[in-house]
């Protein structure tokens, strides 16, 4: 008698299937939001300013905690591991969008060239940091023409000094990148994280069988 009573009570106390599914879905959504907000976030490359390091259609994961975790809708950080360093590929909120509504602000991706206190000068496309030539293999020039400083800061800039708490960034596709040469420095509070791996790559211009760039998937970003 007790056995049948217990079985009946167990059946009565069991949650309906739709409640179990809804609770599992809520937990999954909360975990995804926590991961996206504090740990990692996915980004897609929409332009060619970082060629050939990053191609249009590359999908990246960004480490959001290495520079300190942002509180949602705030510029405050905590648990900072280290500050951005020269050579890091970073994702940041475009400083020119600061006065726009939150969901209208754009994310940019560039490489850190100048750290706080550095003197930056660009002469004939070459970058000098504190008087020394800064040449990296990732930087490419796809336009052999020199543009005079009167017309554009692209090939001749500075010398300028990077203020405290800010960074000078450039795209690896130096001749076709809209970066600190044109609009100034990136405040550290606007930096969202460091791009570190390509988890997917899709070439929308290729034939169907060649759209997926298999050779780029899982590659670290240097």
Image: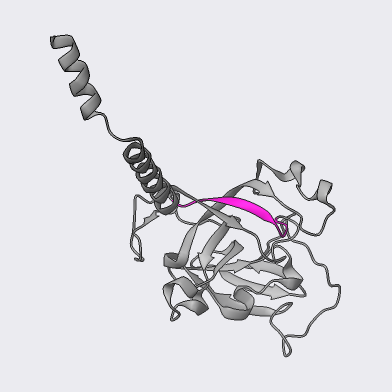
Task: Give whichever of 112, 216 is nearer the camera.
Answer: 216
Task: Give whichever of 139, 48 is nearer the camera.
Answer: 48
Q: Position of residue 138 (x, y in %)?
A: 73, 56
Q: In which quarter of the image is the N terminus?
A: top left
Q: How many marks?
A: 0
Task: Give whichever of 137, 59 is nearer the camera.
Answer: 59
On screen, residue 61 above or below 73: above
Q: Which range of residues does the magenta coloring cover?
A: 54-64
On screen, residue 217 above or below 9: below
Residue 185: tell me if it is visible. Answer: yes
Colour scheme of the rendered structure: one colour
Q: Is residue 75 left or right of residue 41?
A: left
- Residue reaching furthest left? 2
Q: Position of residue 209 (x, y in %)?
A: 83, 46
Q: Position of residue 127 (x, y in %)?
A: 69, 68
Q: Where is residue 111 in the image (x, y as percent from the top left)?
A: 61, 61
Residue at left offset 43%, top offset 81%? 99
Q: Is residue 204 left or right of residue 68?
A: right
- Residue reaching furthest bottom? 150
Residue 163: tell me if it is visible. Answer: no
Task: Give whichever of 210, 118 is nearer the camera.
Answer: 210
Q: Is residue 96 magenta?
A: no
Residue at left offset 69%, top offset 43%? 217
Residue at left offset 21%, top offset 28%? 12
């Amino acid at each position: 008698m007790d056995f049948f009573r217990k079985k009946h009570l167990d059946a009565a106390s069991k949650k309906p299937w739709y409640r179990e599914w809804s609770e599992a879905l809520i937990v999954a959504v909360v975990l995804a939001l926590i991961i996206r907000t504090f740990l990692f976030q996915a980004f897609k490359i929409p332009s060619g300013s970082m060629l050939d390091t990053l191609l249009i259609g590359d999908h990246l994961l960004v480490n959001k905690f290495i520079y300190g975790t942002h509180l949602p809708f705030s510029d405050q950080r905590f648990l900072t591991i280290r500050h951005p360093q020269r050579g890091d590929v970073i994702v940041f909120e475009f400083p020119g969008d600061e006065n726009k509504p939150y969901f209208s602000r754009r994310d940019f991706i560039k490489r850190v060239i100048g750290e706080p206190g550095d003197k930056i000068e660009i002469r004939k496309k070459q970058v000098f940091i504190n008087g020394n030539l800064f040449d990296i293999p990732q930087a490419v020039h796809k336009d052999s023409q020199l543009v005079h400083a009167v017309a554009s800061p692209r090939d001749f800039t500075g010398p300028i000094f990077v203020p405290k708490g800010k960074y000078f960034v450039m795209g690896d596709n130096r001749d076709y990148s809209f970066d600190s040469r044109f609009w100034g420095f990136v405040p550290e509070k606007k930096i969202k994280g460091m791009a570190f791996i390509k988890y997917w790559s899709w070439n929308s211009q290729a034939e169907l069988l060649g759209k997926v760039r298999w050779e780029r998937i899982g590659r670290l970003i240097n």
